Amino acid sequence: MEKYDVLVVGAGPAGTAVTKHIAKKGYKVLVVDSKENPGTPQKCSGLFSKNILHIAGLKKNEILCEIKGARIHSPSGEKINIRTKETQGYVVDRTIFDTRLLDEAKSAGAEIRTKTRFLKYENNIAYFSDSKPIFTKIIIGADGSNSIVAKNFGFPELEKKILGVINLYPEKPKDDIVELYLSRKTAPGLFAWKIPRKDDVEFGIGADKNTMQYFNRFLLLQNVKKKPKATTGGIIPLKWRDETVRRNCLLVGDAAGHTKATTGGGVVLSIRSAKIAAEAVCSALQKDDIAILSTYEIKWKKEIGRDLKYALLIRKFLNSLDDSEIDKLVAISSQNEVVAFLKENGDMDYPTKMIFVAIKRPKIWVPYMRFLPKIVKCILQH
Ligand SMILES: Cc1cc2nc3c(=O)[nH]c(=O)nc-3n(C[C@H](O)[C@H](O)[C@H](O)COP(=O)(O)OP(=O)(O)OC[C@H]3O[C@@H](n4cnc5c(N)ncnc54)[C@H](O)[C@@H]3O)c2cc1C
């Protein structure tokens, strides 16, 4: 039987990032994915903040559109325009992006098996659908929100999840900003959106119930009557798992719930925490001590735990508002000082930084004090 140091299940951005870093250190790593071409079809908007540049880099052919801001729509139709001269984010072709990350893992020395579904793991032996079993010292679950690896090791279920759906329409985008629609009647639990892509416009929604029903209603409101050229989607975790290491198993990316509850985006944080996982794995292999794997959980909680917590707190607060309160929130947020502040300090991935800068500027936070009872309630329930 073939022996490996590490098996990584799932070749999405989290899986390929962790694989690359471990393989680079010379360990024998196998990454498997049930799909023939991981990343296809794209089930994600592929909107990344500019933080992606130092986390994974971007190649020219991966960028579909540079994003220069956002327009936020209130339930009653008021708008906040946050437009900047500089690029704030990128809409990326996930198929090309994921394939490049997989190629980088391969170049680092990892073995890749696609069309190979992980079935179970027992006594250090992993079993697959279309491949012989293998022996592995460590197994990493990078197999998304419905992680079979997590189930195999008896990790508790992800607590909070929503369904996200996207439709693509062939049409040259007229703008380079993202449109967000906030309303409990439009998208309870998250929001609906319109995103420009190179030759398409994407409409999407995340909702915590009856997602397709809300999506059809949103499309009607937007006067979108054409048939989309593609519809995809998937489950988005809105809360991290408290436990991400058990014995010789680690969970990364969506399998670990490393997505931001504010936007549902997970790629930047997934790649960041995958690097932390790789450090713990290499150290455990080098010292031949599986107990070292627990340093992964300690470290990701230290590095991204606070941002995940603040993102969830903001989400809980937003979800506690009815539409008339969202209208008030949008009205306050459209004041010039707040818009200028968001232009300067807005960060999709790291809300902590933004909150600490805001605290020092009473002009920014005093108007929001009308929501104090709700904010306090959310903090107490957190
Ligand atoms: C509608 C929607 C829009 C989104 N928009 C954005 C966005 O704009 N920006 C952003 O940052 N994030 C976005 N996300 C979230 C983003 O897609 C995820 O956070 C990201 O893909 C997580 O990467 P991952 O590597 O953990 O998992 P995935 O990318 O889901 O990869 C998991 C891989 O595991 C494989 N797999 C699963 N089970 C098995 C098995 N048993 N055996 C072998 N292989 C298996 C799958 O085939 C898959 O390739 C969106 C999600 C949705 C649903």
Image (spheres, rainbow, N blue to C red):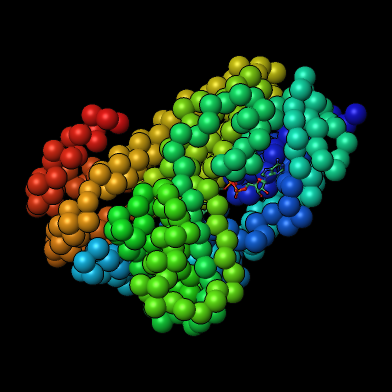
Question: Camera-side residue: 149 or 21?
Answer: 149
Q: Going 24% across and 33% down the picture, which residue do you hit?
A: 379
From this viewpoint, is residue 365 visible? yes
Say which quadrant the C terminus sits in.
top left
**187 left or right, relative to 54:** left
Q: Quadrant of residue 147?
A: top right
> Horizontally, is 361 left or right of 166 in the view?
left
User: How many numbered marks, from 0 up?
Assistant: 0
**Residue in front for this viewpoint, 34 or 17:** 34
Percent from the top left, x then y, of residue 311? 34, 43
For residue 229, above or below residue 246: below
Judge from the rendering whether residue 352 lies leftward or rightward of residue 7; answer left or right.
left
Q: Is residue 61 left or right of residue 310?
A: right
Q: Position of residue 350 (x, y in %)?
A: 36, 46
Report if residue 362 is visible in the image: no
> With respect to residue 134, does 131 lie above or below?
below
The residue at 60%/61% (across/down) is: 42
Q: Quadrant of the N terminus?
A: top right
Which residue shows up at 64% across the image and 25% down it? 153
Foreground residue, 281 or 270?
Answer: 270
From the top left corner, tell me how far across and down residue 265 is, in percent: 46, 51
Displayed quadrant of residue 40: bottom right
Residue in the picture at 65% in, 57% down: 39
Q: Nearer the viewer, residue 31 or 167?
A: 167
